[in-house]
């Protein structure tokens, strides 16, 4: 997904083209329409526009075309994280728990891990640092095993934030520096220009700043 690396101009052009194709093919009421709604909601979330992400997701969930478990899970995750960003994490936790429960019934390991990562974020924001740290650390280990460094560094950041919240400064520092090292490997994988765009993505920019602050504040 182009929006995952911050190239919103290209992503929006592709979205416009996909909408045009859907109009020409009379596919606006089917699975393609749901995929486009998902794309729009994910892009809004990455831009830290929770209200738009929530509106797109709730509208899609209300549609009979979104009943496929995979779509249900992805939209619930967007709602969960959007509510965290909006300052209502406790409301988001229930959506994440629903998404995790649905994902556990399926066979998509990456989707299940993404659900657990979002749940860690919501649980941490709701004040349960110990639980959040455990979930994030377990997810990080699995992302490492799967070679998914983009998700792995963010899981490491959440684990570090949870440790800091729990008063474990050394553990917070250790996990933050580890997350920074993983992020450096992602830079090598993406290349300089894509990585630069990735760091400009509003949600990633915010998380990167959190990471740098964690390392600076907890360094002996």
Image (spheres, grey):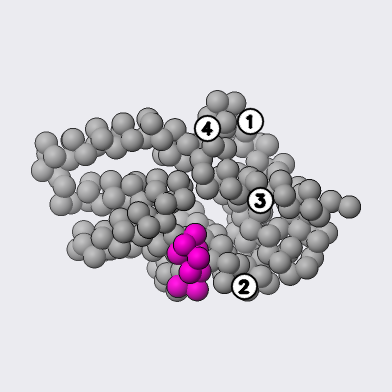
- Compared to residue 74, the image places residue 147 above or below, namely above
Q: Are marks 4 and 2 in contact (CB under 8 Å)?
A: no
Position in image of residue 218 (x %, y %): 81, 55
Give the structural element (helix, strand or loop) at label 4.
helix
Of tags 1 and 3, the one toward the viewer is 3
Q: Is residue 130 on the magenta stretch?
A: no
Q: Are marks 4 and 1 in contact (CB under 8 Å)?
A: no
Q: Are marks 3 and 4 in contact (CB under 8 Å)?
A: no
Position in image of residue 78 (x %, y %): 41, 58
Residue matched to label 2 = 127
> Residue 65 occupies which quadrant of the picture?
bottom left
Residue at 64% across, 58% down: 158
Of tags 1 and 2, the one toward the viewer is 2
Position in image of residue 132 (x %, y %): 62, 68
**Real-space CA distance between mark 2 and mark 3, rounded to the nearest whole angstrom:** 17 Å
Residue density around tag 3, few if under 14, some if 14–19, many if 20 or more, within 10 Å:
some
Residue stretch rendered in magenta on the structure: 83-91
Residue at 10% across, 43% down: 26
Residue matched to label 4 = 197
Q: Are marks 1 and 3 in contact (CB under 8 Å)?
A: no
**Real-space CA distance between mark 3 and mark 4, rounded to the nearest whole angstrom:** 18 Å
* Circle on res. 210: 3
Give the structural element (helix, strand or loop) at label 3.
helix
Q: Is residue 116 left or right of residue 72?
A: right
Q: Main secondary structure of the magenta part?
A: helix
Give the structural element (helix, strand or loop) at label 1.
helix
Residue matched to label 1 = 188
- Mark closest to the chain's N terminus, 3 or 4: 4
- Mark closest to the chain's N terminus, 4 or 2: 2
Q: Is residue 42 left or right of residue 29?
A: right
**Real-space CA distance between mark 4 and mark 1, rounded to the nearest whole angstrom:** 14 Å
Quadrant in the picture for the N terminus: top left
């Amino acid at each position: 997904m182009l929006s995952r690396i911050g190239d919103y101009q290209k992503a929006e052009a592709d979205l416009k083209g996909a909408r045009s194709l859907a109009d020409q093919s009379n596919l606006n009421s089917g699975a393609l329409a749901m995929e486009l709604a998902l794309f729009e909601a994910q892009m809004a979330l990455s831009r830290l526009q929770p209200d738009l992400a929530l509106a797109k997701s709730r509208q899609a969930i209300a549609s009979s075309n979104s009943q496929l478990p995979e779509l249900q899970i992805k939209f619930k995750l967007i709602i969960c994280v959007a509510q965290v960003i909006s300052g209502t994490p406790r409301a988001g936790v229930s959506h994440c728990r629903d998404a995790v429960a649905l994902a556990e019934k399926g066979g998509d390991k990456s989707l299940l891990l993404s659900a657990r990562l979002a749940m860690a974020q919501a649980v941490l924001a709701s004040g349960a640092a110990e639980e959040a740290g455990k979930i994030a650390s377990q997810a990080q280990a699995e992302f490492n095993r799967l070679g998914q460094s983009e998700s792995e560094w963010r899981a490491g950041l959440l684990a570090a934030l949870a440790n800091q919240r729990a008063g474990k400064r050394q553990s917070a520092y250790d996990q933050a520096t580890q997350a920074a090292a993983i992020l450096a490997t992602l830079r090598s994988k993406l290349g300089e220009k894509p990585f630069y765009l990735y760091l400009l993505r509003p949600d990633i920019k915010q998380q990167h700043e959190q990471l740098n602050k964690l390392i600076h504040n907890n360094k002996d």
